[in-house]
Image (cartoon, coloured by chain):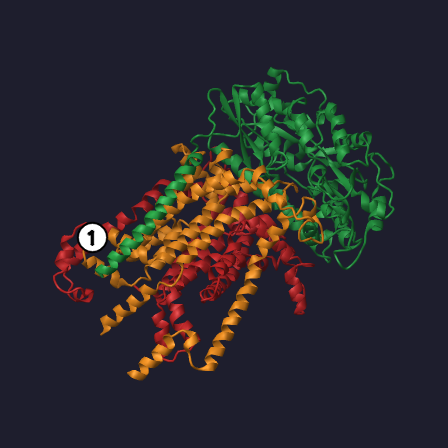
Amino acid sequence: MHNLLEKKNILFTKDAFLNILLFFVLFSITGCSVLGVGTNTFKGGVTITWLVRTDPQINPWEIKTVSDFEASHPNIHVKIVMSPSGANYDQKLETMEVGWEPADIFSHWGNNSWADAVYRGYAADLTPYINASHFSFAGMDPKLLQEYSVKDHVYAIPFATGGSYLFYNVDLFQKAHVPLPPTSWDDPNWTWNTVLKDAQALNVANQSLNQRVYGLSDDLWPENANAWLFGGDIFQPSTYTTGVVDTVQANSQPVEQAEQWKHDLIYKYQVSPTPTDASLLNGFLSGKVAMDMTGVWGFWTYQPASFHWAVAPLPRIQTDKDVLFTDPWMMAKDSHHPQEAWQFLQWLCDPSHGAKTYMETSGAVPPWSQLLPEWAANTHKTIPSLNINQLEQIAQGSLAHGQESINHLAISYGQYNDVISNVLSPLFSNRGVSAPNIINQLQQQMEATIKQVGPLKPLQTSK
Amino acid sequence: MDVSNAQVLDTSSTQASEIRRQPRRNRSGRLEAREARAFWLLISPWIIGFIASTGGPIIASLVLSFTDYTGTAQFPTFVGLQNYQMLSIDPIFLKSLAVTIYYVILSVPLSLILSLLLALLLNQRVRFQGVFRTIFYLPSIVSGVVISLLWQWILNPDFGLLNFALHFLNIPAVLWFQDERAVVPAFVLMSLWGLGGPMVIFLASLQGIPSDLYEAASLDGANNWNKFLHITIPMLSPAILLNLITGVITAFQIFVPAYVITQGGPNYGSEFYALYLFNNAFQYFKFGYAAGQAWILFIIILALTILLLQLSKRFVYYES
Amino acid sequence: MAVQARSRSKMQAETTYTVRDTTLWRKRVSKTLIYVLLIVLALVFLAPLLWMLSTALKTEGDVSLFPPIIASNPPQWYNFVTALIKVPIPQYMLNTVAYCAATIIGDLLSSSLIAYAFAHVRFRYREVVFILVLATMMIPYQVLIIPQFLLFRSLGWIDTYLPLIVPTYFGSPFLIFLLRQSFRMLPREYIEAAKLDGANHLTIWWRIILPLSKPALAAVAIFSFMYHWNDLIGPLIYLNTNEEYPISLGLSQYTAALGGTQWNLLMAASLVALIPCILVFFFSQRYIVQGIAVARVTTNERENANA
């Protein structure tokens, strides 16, 4: 026994000693960076935090913007904190807020809405700062500013906007000799019938997915965007101003027609892919979908496409009302350095600084009309088949015909969205399911959810 | 440490059994007290850690489950048992519990059996044993996003590999992630790629089985199946218990795959317990409600674990 | 006696020395079958990595092509370079190595000490305390995030790795459980004998238990490393300074909402980030091999005791 003890002891000690030595060497070399020793410490002045979402295309813009801003504001340091968008962003935002070190500048990159940010006390009332700095909104569509205000107090300033469009594959159109869509939102011929005819002409029904071409894919979001085209809505008009969902009309006729129509596109006309095939295909970018109705993000996500593509207005069914997606910057209500944070926010929203450079990097539609010609000129480079005037027409038309998305304006919208997508999914996955049944279920579930969310007060200005 | 006791006990030979034959009351009492002191001293790191960093938050979450805390800086108000009452009639909560239990029942036994088989396979003396082990372990550390994407391909109803194989065997195609009845089995299949973890535990345990036992059994005329049943399994039983209990605990808390692929659909078919909890805590601003959910789950898992540990006294063999 | 010795030596001898042809043939077939099974399964388990490699070799436009191609023409090997520069992956990997090194030491030391107490120290309420340890694994972490964050904030540890490293020096329930099971498989004779030689618990732990538990400790090192290497939520909540981020957050910087994720670069960076994991696993699993010395000694002891 003694021999065993001693023998094991020597062997173990040598091994362990070497291992521990190795760890300590590693640790000391890199431990400095881990514990923050030696990183750039900012001397003097104020540090504010900017919580951004990860995006390999946009993050370089954020870094450049910070260095531009700091060059002209030497006493303010902006610390960029990156988080993946969606639920992670909400987690980070909430934890920072609860920990009394809120992110000074942020946006609605999570699943929660602007209305949530105001209702839960995250977002600051910007009107005093706007008045003190005489920030001018000349050139901004007043509708965009109104929707992010509560009783004329501004809670967020838009820096990018855009509507929903019909993106189409120019190569497929030319191959099938189908006339290209118009660019005017008021074109009387751009109706549902025209689009359906085009879709059927472009459609190539075949067994093998290799040869298959789909005529049209409806990727409009949120779900009630379809109901808008049929002249109705799941949500009440009052929700868009007060933020409160107290009743819904999910079982109204326009909603039923809209959902049945979407089902028919897949199973009756067979011009749209089933959800499973859509997830496999990765949609429009695969080159197998001739027309895709989706939001403004198509302008930058479809840039790497290996075919020629262009943009058109949404077709008119009962209406051609499209969903607007306006991204604003907000400031933390409990910010430790509100003055400096405001200076940075101002810079970000300024049509000659942040808003301009953001537009140039992302391709998003600017909320400032004076920037629109430059936007059109830049976009023309990705969409050579449309000239600058046509592009301006499409952008302006979408703003004029559009209304801000419910997911930005309703409190706790995330919860309702989960219900909608869950209850409606069998309708699109199964041939045999039809709309009337499903939307009655939807109405029931939505009403149950409203009770669960509990009574909410309409958005108020904070004291 | 107090050496005097040891010296007193060491008067005769080194056989431990001799001492056990003559217990002396006050000495065993002192021994017990000494062991108790040693116990508390040895686990003191965990005690300190628990008090300092885990215990507080756990108790805080319990307290919060009796409030309407929203998870923001707004101060919570006390609401008593309201959260628990609302949970008991919440259809989504009940559905999430059912879905999760279904998942646990399917995935835990499957994972146990298959990881054991894999470990046995990788314990064979083959060349490149290390390479094979690494390959089998790798999928369990590849990022969840990549695995989720890959499985969406494999389980695609029209073009996926699995339905292709089923078609070959003349079994009708399954809609997998698109069918609310098949979505949980789809996630169970997905979890099989994470077999690397339990497999490593079984592998490490297999090394502790003395080869002489097998040789002695061969001499007595045992075939491979007998050896497996009467040597391998009992000697592995501590590891089986470990994988079983931790498997149950982690299976009940499955979250990321459902969050990435189905977000709880279709029709709440994959609305796992932890997914609904996460949504309540961070998306719906109902942190108190989520805390109530957490504690209900805790009680369920605790009861199961105690049951398993009690059962283990009969079925698990420890060398010591 | 002689007959028994001869047949025993036959069994103990290597396969090649067996004299009966059918046994040799059967062994050869089973060995081949094992190899075939291993290779088939290996291909199945390698599928995710092959898929990642295929995506990494494509241009951004080719990623979405259907039907999918194996790689762009020409294969974009340069993606691996781009992926390491666009987001500072090497820096993040270095950060994570230091972070994981610190946590492995903590996990190994604290969990083994605590597991030893649960395995070999006699205490009446030992099992109750053990269930308490297990119980801390049963609370979903989502509800603990905010209270724990507030706790560490009061210590001033926000924006450092301390909230992630320090708790590992105080035991992790899963690892404690793992090691407890493993320690209880060691024969009690060793510990009794050591006690009679005057060893205290710490000596027994350090000089007997740990050396004999190399496979289990290797498993602990593997689990600890992999968990901390891939941990996303912890660093996301506690870290704010970009230069300090670990690799998990670094990789997420290639993701974006609404289809903006750069899959080819993400896959290339993920593959590179897997290399340390592969190395750690490969070198740790070397310790998961039969402890021959242990086996023989144990059986001899038992025989001597029974004689």
Measured as percent of width and height from the top left, residue A86 is found at 59, 40
Please report the residue visible at 63 percent of the width from the left and 54 percent of the height from the top.
Answer: B152
Answer yes or no: is residue B65 visible: no
Amino acid on which disc 1 is placed:
Ala
Q: How many marks?
A: 1
Measured as percent of width and height from the top left, residue A230 is found at 78, 42
**Viewer-closest of B159 and B182:** B159
Q: Chain of mark 1?
A: B
Quadrant the C terminus of chain A occupies: top right
How many neighbours does mark 1 have within 10 angstroms: few (below 14), some (14-19), or many (20 or more)? some
Measured as percent of width and height from the top left, residue B311 is found at 38, 64
Please report the residue visible at 49 percent of the width from the left and 20 percent of the height from the top.
Answer: A45
The chain shown in green is which? A
In the visual, does C108 lie left or right of A302? left
In the visual, does C23 lie left or right of B314? right
Answer yes or no: is residue B277 visible: yes
Please report the residue visible at 17 percent of the width from the left and 50 percent of the height from the top.
Answer: B2
Q: Which residue is mark 1?
A: B33
In the rendered structure, the colour chosen for chain B is red
Measured as percent of width and height from the top left, residue A435 is found at 73, 51
The chain shown in orange is which? C
**Viewer-closest of A61 and A295:** A61
Q: Secondary structure at mark 1?
A: helix
> Can you say whether A269 is above or below B319 in the image?
above
Q: Residue lying furthest front in this view? A: C17
> Can you say whether C119 is above or below C269 in the image?
below
